[in-house]
């Protein structure tokens, strides 16, 4: 009777030893200090385990809390809590109520809502970097597909090596504010801070080394006052024409099936020739496993109904996407001329 018990104990301790060995092995091979090391992690839970990145940790006390707190140097006022009243004359070109994208204030450029080239999708994803994005970025890499990523500044602070991967992989980076608020509810100073801390000289620059010149307002909530602030910071406002609602699944009014239906009806529109003369932009997210999985599963269909899927900056021939002049994007013609092997977005000097 004792033999089996002993046997069990020995088996157990052998298993425990094996497990310890495996763990030690993992710990030795996982490098969480470099972009390449982090990009090589394939277990999403491991990817999402916080890590320390000294350049961010050392600077974190010069960045705001999230969300920005009232009464701090970063946040002067409380956001308006009552909804703004909407006037049908829409004097401020407020997108949230009127979907207005052509400013009424003089000297502001219109928002970008579409890729100008025929049969072209301005391909991009909001709300990253998501810590578990390696599988998705690996997929894009396997397809030699570049996209535009609209990064949230505080996510960049949390997962800096993930943010760096976007640049390394040749994607275009635009800003998506510091903490993802409804921008039109903010006092101008706070709206400025939301853009400043995510972009100009701040988190994206600190971590990735570049200063974006494009942004997308969270929830599309922009009006001429906010556009003027963004414009003064050198940020082009990028909107969209179609929305998958992939980030809005609540299980009630918007379900996973709603998102699938939205993708399918968008694909049908493209099939029907809706973008034969002018391309478009579709709103999709890097938010979580669901949004990234849908992006992967609909990729082949998007590729087949559009002639070209390109980063928005490429569709605009925006060859210098950042303030720093040593990075460049290909022109649209360059990107598509070697269609199966578009040039990498590489530092040119
Ligand atoms: C759109 O372009 C495709 C491919 O060239 C063509 O087959 C289709 O008839 C066009 N549709 C419309 C509505 O122009
Ligand atoms: C990233 O995606 C994972 C997997 O879906 C999810 O658990 C996590 O909450 C997301 N993180 C962020 C910061 O959005
Ligand atoms: C979604 O999660 C599963 C399970 O962790 C993982 O195998 C898969 O690669 C993830 N997909 C994406 C696109 O992140
Ligand atoms: C991009 O460049 C191509 C080729 O020079 C031109 O045909 C196209 O109109 C340009 N697009 C934009 C948005 O400037
Ligand atoms: C590009 O220039 C910036 C300074 O403007 C510098 O910090 C960065 O290292 C340069 N990057 C490359 C790849 O040369
Ligand atoms: Zn967003």
Image (tube, rainbow, N blue to C red):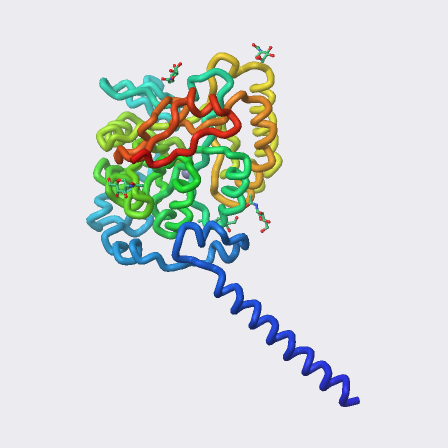
Q: Would residue 345 be seen by someone viewing this image from the given angle? A: yes
146 left or right of 232 in image: right
Spot occupied by residue 336 in the image (x, y as percentages of width and height): 47, 23
Determine the residue positioned at 29% across, 46% down: 203
Q: How many marks?
A: 0
Q: Would residue 258 be seen by someone viewing this image from the given angle? A: no
Q: Nearer the viewer, residue 171 or 129?
A: 171
Quadrant location of residue 196?
top left
Spot occupied by residue 21 in the image (x, y as percentages of width and height): 56, 71
Determine the residue positioned at 40% across, 59% down: 51
Vertical arrangement, residue 302 with respect to residue 82, above or below? above
Residue lying farthest right? 1
Q: Nearer the viewer, residue 58 or 14?
A: 14
Q: Nearer the viewer, residue 287 or 163?
A: 163
Residue lying farthest front? 349
Q: Quadrant of ligand 6?
A: top left
Spot occupied by residue 319 in the image (x, y as percentages of width and height): 34, 26
Determine the residue positioned at 24% across, 38% down: 192
Residue lying farthest bottom? 2
């Amino acid at each position: 009777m004792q033999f089996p018990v002993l046997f069990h104990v020995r088996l157990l301790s052998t298993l425990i030893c094996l497990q310890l060995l495996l763990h030690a092995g993992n710990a030795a091979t996982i490098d969480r200090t470099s972009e390449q090391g982090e990009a090589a992690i394939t277990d999403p839970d491991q990817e999402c385990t916080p890590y320390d990145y000294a350049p961010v940790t050392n600077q974190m006390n010069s960045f705001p809390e999230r969300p920005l707190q009232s009464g701090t140097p970063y946040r002067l006022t409380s956001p308006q809590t009552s909804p703004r009243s909407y006037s049908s004359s829409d004097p401020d070109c407020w997108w949230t109520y009127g979907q207005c994208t052509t400013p009424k204030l003089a000297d502001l450029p219109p928002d970008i809502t579409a890729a100008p080239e025929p049969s072209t999708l301005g391909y991009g994803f909001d709300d990253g970097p998501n810590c578990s994005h390696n599988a998705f970025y690996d997929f894009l890499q396997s397809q030699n597909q570049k996209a535009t990523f609209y990064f949230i500044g505080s996510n960049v602070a949390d997962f800096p090596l993930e943010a760096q991967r976007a640049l390394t992989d040749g994607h275009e980076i635009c800003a998506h504010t510091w903490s993802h608020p409804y921008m039109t509810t903010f006092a101008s100073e706070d709206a400025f801070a939301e853009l400043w801390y995510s972009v100009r000289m701040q988190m994206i620059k600190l971590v990735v080394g570049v200063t974006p010149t494009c942004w997308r307002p969270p929830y599309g909530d922009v009006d001429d006052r906010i556009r003027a602030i963004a414009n003064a910071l050198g940020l082009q406002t990028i909107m969209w024409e179609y929305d998958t609602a992939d980030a809005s699944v609540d299980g009630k009014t918007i379900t996973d099936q709603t998102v699938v239906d939205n993708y399918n009806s968008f694909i049908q529109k493209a099939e029907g020739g809706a973008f034969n003369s002018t391309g478009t932009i579709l709103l999709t997210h890097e938010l979580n496993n669901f949004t990234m999985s849908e992006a992967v599963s609909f990729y082949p269909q998007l590729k087949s109904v559009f002639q070209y899927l390109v980063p928005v900056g490429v569709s605009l021939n925006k060859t210098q996407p950042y303030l720093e002049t040593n990075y460049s994007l290909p022109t649209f013609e360059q990107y598509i001329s070697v269609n199966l092997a578009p040039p990498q977005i590489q530092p040119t000097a």
